[in-house]
Image (cartoon, rainbow, N blue to C red):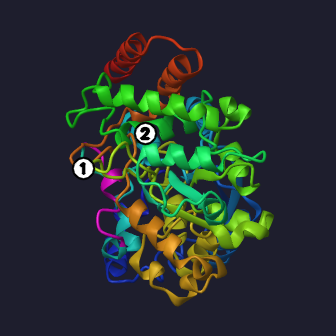
Amino acid sequence: MKNSSMFGHRISRRGALKGMAATTAMASLPLPAMAQETTIRWWSPQAAPAQVDAYMAQIAAFEAANPGVKVVFETTSDEGYAPQLAAAFSSGEVPDIVTHLPSFAIQSYYANGLVEPFNDVIEAIGPDDYFDGANDVFRAADGNYVGTGIGNSAANMLWLRKDLMEEAEIADAPRTWDELRAACQAMQKGGIFGAPLPYGRNSMTTLIFVGVIHQAGGQIFDTDLNVALDTQATRDALEFYASMRELCPPGATNYSWGEAITAFVSGATATGIYTGRVLGNVNAQNPPIADSVTCVRYPTASTDIPAWTFNDFPSVFIPKQSSNIDVAEAFAASLFNPDGYIQQLHAAPGHVLPVLKSINENPQYQANEIIQKYPGEVELMAQAAAGGFNLGYESAAHQSNEKAGEVVGSGVIADMVQRVVLNGENADQVIGDTTKAIEDIMAG
């Protein structure tokens, strides 16, 4: 199998695919007979047991349709994928397909010549089946698509306990930061803390705080990608975040994604900040509170500022150094076949939301127990995620930022939070230092 795309050279096959629905995509497209077994490696940081079961089913279906092909699944981690991939790119021992990384990471890799264009796979899946604008975040400066979404996520929803709100005589979900603080203060009692915000030097603190800056009416970059951090909005965001520290557990100093979701699901905090994985975890791990859980968009500094949802656009992409790009492209497209894709989405219902209209409307997808139990919450997350952004795509007016992954990986925004909020350093000095650090990354 040569390292060239079969899609680019087999026009008749691609032409035949053009009219096919996403229900068949590439899984039904047989690859050329193999002289010997071909193995491709699949990496993902999303590896809960039910998700892995879904992946194994997708692998089995693809292998059955393509004798001579073997797919090996390997796990990474949300915090560890960057150094793992850096080592793989450096050595040339790359996975053949990677899923569930944020879109901004792929833009950085593509800008450095490390990612294969994904245009033909999107064409095979069916571009008209995607929700409007779903692939905009994956369009590079040269016009190519660097990957596609394996799903959408609404990663900074505010999760609430209706039972605790009722006990504290809180009638409405908080819409502003002042209302959120007041609600957390009223519910923080009996060993329950108000919130599980992260303050560690990690990607969660970075990504959540990017959202907080937007919720203050600010941004990290202007639409021309000049650093725009040194504003009153950033100062307001830091002040709010500092005011919330006393309402979070002591361990929040080191919180990342796992600790944050566990704090809310276990009942240790009255509110939460996370994606829809909360729903499945609460029902499995703490069913007594399952009927009391709901979510809203995270509050903003004032009602004049619209909500800003962090969608990391969980992705699928193919490293350019793969020696089996043909097979990897076919397997990538097969991941969107309904049976396997729906099983994968159901492994964490509400956590990763479908990017294809046909899947969202599919009765098989809608039949899930969690989706049926929380229709309002799932629909709200779907709406929020569809209008969501991240550091690589801060607004519809922004161009895609190919250096966003490097900014996140540097930890400079989490450092800013720790220096001001935990260490009490002067905000003006720290914001200036952080601005300079980000400018250096952008110029590098």
Q: Which mark is residue 131?
A: none
Percent across and percent down for residue 424 are 54, 14
Residue 406 appears in the rendering: no
Percent across and percent down for residue 30 are 54, 76
Residue 205, quarter of picture: top right
For residue 105, above or below residue 286:
above
Residue 60, quarter of picture: bottom right
What residue is disc 2 on? 212
Q: Amino acid at mark 1?
A: Gly
Residue 197, quarter of picture: top right
Q: Amino acid at mark 2?
A: Val
What residue is disc 1 on? 143
Task: Find the magenta span and give its range.
Answer: 130-141
Percent across and percent down for residue 233 are 32, 31
Q: Main secondary structure of the magenta part?
A: loop
Tell me the quadrant of the picture where the N terminus can be found.
Answer: bottom right
Pick the front one: 235 or 430: 235
SS type, badge 1: loop
Residue name at image x 78 percent, y 69 percent: 288
